């Protein structure tokens, strides 16, 4: 028996790769084309959020497609209303405000019973109008926060048992992004 040479190993390896590629091409060629229902089943169960203006005239309500009411909150600052969408952990995106201002927030707890008491905490300072709130018939609760004069994050956390919703208000200018290079 002859001793194998490197050239024979290369030829043998290349042959195996070519045979594998041929089998793959032939297999893919005879697979049926996926229909639309197959493609729909492969999508994420939660579509990307898009903001849509309602068709009703003279309303401030905004619907966010693909996000449950539990993840929608509203903030009123200086008589302007904003709609925010929370992440799956119930955290709303950072909201920039002026120091010494007043913020009103509203959020929904759709799995809670109307009339339930909701704990409201100002985690990083500021003055709340109340430390508890009561869910109305629409399962919404509101709070008012008077912001302090010092810059930084000021979070408000609302709790119903293990469910939380957290707003983060940033007083002052947006902090610069610092890239550390070692």
Image (cartoon, rainbow, N blue to C red):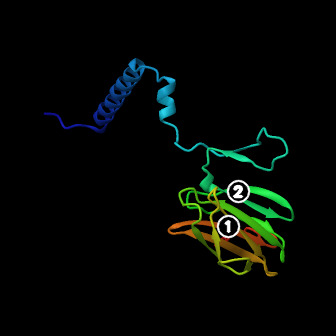
The residue sitting at 84% across, 71% down in the picture is 98
Residue 26 x/y as whole percent: 38, 20
Lateral position of residue 4 relative to residue 129, left or right: left
Labelled disc at residue 84: 2
- Which class describes the residues within 10 Å of circle 2: few (<14), some (14-19), or many (20+)? many
Residue 94 x/y as whole percent: 71, 65
From mark 1 to mark 2, how far is it between C-alphas?
A: 9 Å
Q: Work out which quarter of the rendered image holds the N terminus and state it.
A: top left
Whether residue 166 is visible here, answered yes or no, is: yes
The residue sitting at 84% across, 41% down in the picture is 57
Q: Work out which quarter of the rendered image holds the C terminus and state it.
A: bottom right
* Quadrant in which residue 74 is drawn: bottom right
In-front residue for pair 168/160: 160
Whether residue 93 is visible here, answered yes or no, is: no
The number of numbered discs placed on residues in the rendered structure image is 2
In-front residue for pair 19/137: 137
Q: Earlier in the sequence, mark 1 or mark 2?
A: 2
Image marks 1 and 2: residues in contact by CB distance under 8 Å:
yes
- Which class describes the residues within 10 Å of circle 1: few (<14), some (14-19), or many (20+)? many
Question: Which residue in the protein does label 1 denote?
Answer: 167
The residue sitting at 36% across, 27% down in the picture is 18
Lateral position of residue 168 relative to residue 100, left or right: left
* Quadrant in which residue 166 is drawn: bottom right
The residue sitting at 63% across, 68% down in the picture is 134
């Amino acid at each position: 028996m002859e001793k194998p040479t490197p050239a024979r190993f290369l030829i043998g390896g290349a042959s195996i790769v070519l045979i594998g590629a041929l089998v793959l091409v032939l297999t893919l060629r005879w697979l049926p084309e996926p229909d639309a229902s197959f493609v729909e089943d492969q999508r994420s169960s939660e579509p990307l959020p898009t903001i849509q203006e309602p068709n009703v005239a003279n309303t401030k309500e905004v619907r966010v497609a693909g996000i449950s009411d539990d993840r929608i909150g509203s903030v009123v600052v200086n008589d302007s209303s904003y709609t925010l969408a929370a992440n799956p952990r119930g955290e709303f995106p950072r909201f920039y405000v002026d120091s010494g201002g007043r913020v009103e927030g509203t959020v929904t707890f759709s799995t809670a019973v109307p009339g339930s008491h909701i704990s409201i905490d100002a985690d990083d300072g500021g003055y709340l109008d109340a430390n508890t709130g009561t869910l109305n018939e629409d399962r919404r609760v509101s709070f008012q926060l008077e912001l302090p004069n010092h810059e930084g994050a000021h979070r408000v956390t609302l709790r119903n048992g293990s469910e939380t919703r957290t707003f983060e208000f940033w007083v002052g200018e947006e902090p610069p992004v610092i890239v550390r290079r070692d």
